[in-house]
Amino acid sequence: MSAVYSTLSPYYNTPLWGPFLDVWSGRTISEDVTDIVYQIDPPYNNRPDLLAQDIYQDTNLWWVFAVRNPDVIKDPLFDFVAPTIIYIPTKAVVLKSMGL
């Protein structure tokens, strides 16, 4: 059965097993020399979607920060707080890692 998720979804690579998701097959975003070192500002506390909108012009890419920083962000919402320092990949790197 083919995936029913958007190409921008973190679940896009996860196969379906009947009407349910199978074992999650997550995406990866590799380290790149163009990554930006960023300290999360208070207005973005628990709101990776807002930062994704400001950086990538797409709130659907909120999950990119957690995937790129798995050692820092275990919970993509509650660990996304100031003054946490994370790496932010460029939009070109994100799109390339998604095969777009």
Image (cartoon, rainbow, N blue to C red):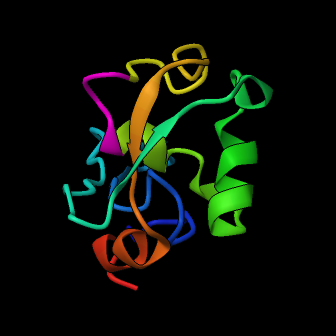
Q: Nearer the viewer, residue 1 or 47?
A: 47
Q: Is residue 70 magenta?
A: yes
Quadrant in which residue 29 is drawn: bottom left
Where residue 5 sits: x, y (%)? 55, 63
Which residue sits at x=43%, y=28%? 85
Screen quadrant of the N terminus? bottom left
- Viewer can see residue 59: no
**Could you say where residue 68 lies in the image, as x and y percent from the top left?**
32, 45
* Overall secondary structure of the magenta section: loop
Residue drawn at the location 57% of the way across and 68% of the way down? 6
Which residue is nearer to you in this view: 88 or 23? 88
Please, is residue 80 above or below residue 11 in the view?
above
**Residue at the image position 32 percent from the left and 79 percent from the top:** 96
Work out which quarter of the rendered image holds the C terminus and state it.
bottom left
Q: How many tags in the picture? A: 0
Work out whether 90 lies above or below 15. below
Residue 5 visible from this viewpoint: yes
Numbered range of the magenta stretch: 68-72
Please tell me which residue is depicted at 29% across the width and 47% down the height of the picture.
Answer: 26
Residue at the bottom extreme of this rendering: 100
- 65 relative position to 14: left or right: right
Q: Which residue lies furthest to the right in this view?
A: 43
Which quadrant of the figure has residue 54? bottom right
Q: Residue furthest top?
A: 78
Classify 98 as above or below 70.
Answer: below
Residue 47 shown left or right of residue 23 in the figure: right
Image location (x, y in percent) of residue 8: 53, 66
